[in-house]
Image (cartoon, helix red, strand yellow):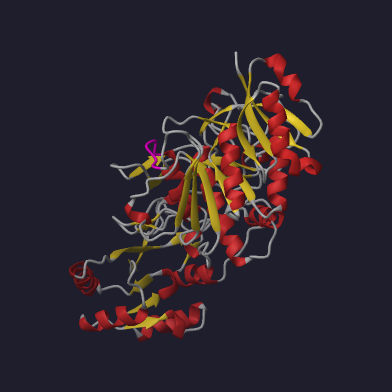
Amino acid sequence: MAIHFIASVKNNHLEEIQSLAKQMEDKGCKITLVAKLLGVISGTVEDEQSLGDLTMDGIDKVEIDRKIGPF
Amino acid sequence: MNANLGFIPSGDQKKFTGRRLVSLGNSSSFQSLNNQAKDVSLRLASSKDYPHNSNSYQKAFQEADGLVFERFGIAVINKDHEDQINRLASSAKSRKTSLYSEPERFVYALHPERLTLWQRICALFFPKRSSGPSPVDKISYEDDNLAYWGIHAVQALSANYSGKGVKIAVLDTGFNLSHQDFQERHIISESFISGETVDDLNGHGTHCTGIAASGMNRENNARYGVAKDADIYIGKVLSNAGSGSDSSILAGLEWALENNCKVISMSLGASIAEGESYSRIYNDLAKKLMDEGLLIIAAAGNDSSRSSGIISPVSHPANCPNIMAVGALDKDMNIADFSCGGINAEGAEVNLAAPGVDIFSAYKSPNNYRRLSGTSMATPFVAGLAALLWEEFPQDSPSEIWAKLERNAFELPLPVRDVGKGLAQT
């Protein structure tokens, strides 16, 4: 089952954010957002196990992309 | 400002002074009103011509039939002039403007000490901050001709600022762009929901935007929004069905940053389990945004059922320490049954509380107005107040605005867990 994720980029790697997103794509991720100012990438991996592949140099934290609703 | 002003007196206390309060609507310059008043043999004085103290206002009421407070768009007319007021109202109607009047009430403080008109006016001009716990037994706010109860509760009518020039981003279900109350407003919008325009077919986003940044309800001239001159940025991050994801919110946050917004109002989120920690990514982002000059204000969440003894923890992302979390109050200053509490560790606390039950605001077409309840409604009250502060203190950092919001809050006799520093106020 596909897992949606968000990943933050380390401050000293912000200029490489497009390159990091490309590396994720090369690992089979589908990228849905590259927020350059915030330093965040979001996308989809095939399964939970693949989330581990996102832990690469330049990536700070990876979390599950939550469903959000109005309060 | 003293939150005790505005009470509706009860019991045997005398309710009305005999004078009438007249809301002047949009055509509120003293000169134009005075010209109309002369036509109906009504002598008006301007508050600008009298020093701001009760003795001078008393003198004004002896020298004239009424006193105009141009800044507030209000006139106070001595008793026995109902006929002239009615003629003024008819004249206003013929010019397709509106003029409402109501009996002036006595306003009572905590111990039923009666406030005179003079004390009330002086309080408007010389607001006092509360300090320390209040001995208030019961506080209550009501809708009236001037404004809906939430606006009275946060004291927006007495604010000297209107959010002019301050950019508020409301990240929600979009906005009813054809709403009659916003046709002269500066609105920038963007949809981050695939296949949906910004137009709000849900209503939630329009409601929240109305609270943060509307002016008056054009149908009755009653005020329901806080920062009535702020620049409005609408980021549609929730679909018309009311669903979204972290990534759509992140896209909205990036857009707000790109557009140099100062305040981000997020009446949205996801439930958090007891003991669950906050998102490190969101917290880091919120810190980054604060460093860039933006303050995020988010709803604490509606998962509690206090009447059943259930208090649920503050939701995501309001549970991040770098995001201001807002709980909801009803008009009697009770915590709302649904409002989440600061029961989780690591900063997942409620920082402030604001009106969030039975709140009137703009809505989707064709209704255009509706009353809703939720911490969603409380959040934009605080966002609007932040905009007022930023207009007054344009050089302030988000941390300084945060601190001022907390310092200005009216302390309530409720647990800090539920209301933080208390009722948010101007």
Q: Is residue B303 visible?
A: yes
Near-viewer residue (B236 or B2): B236
- In the rendered image, residue B369, in percent from the top left (x then y), is placed at 34, 45
Q: Is residue B200 magenta?
A: yes
Give me the residue at 69% from left, 24% from top: A26
Give me the residue at 42% from left, 36% from top: B196
Give me the residue at 69% from left, 31% from top: A22
Near-viewer residue (B272 or B66): B272
Vertical placement of residue B350 versus B22, above or below: above
Is residue B347 rendered to the left or right of residue B147? right
Q: Which image quadrant for residue B320? A: top right
Q: Is residue B421 magenta?
A: no
- In the rendered image, residue B21, in percent from the top left (x then y), is placed at 35, 67
| Quadrant, the N terminus of chain B | bottom right
Near-viewer residue (A65 or B79): A65
Near-viewer residue (B271 or B165): B165
- In the rendered image, residue B59, in percent from the top left (x then y), is placed at 43, 84
Q: Is residue B136 visible?
A: no
| Quadrant, the C terminus of chain B | bottom right
Magenta residue span: B199-203
Is residue B229 rendered to the left or right of residue B96? right
- In the rendered image, residue A28, in percent from the top left (x then y), is placed at 66, 21
Is residue B6 rendered to the left or right of residue B31? right
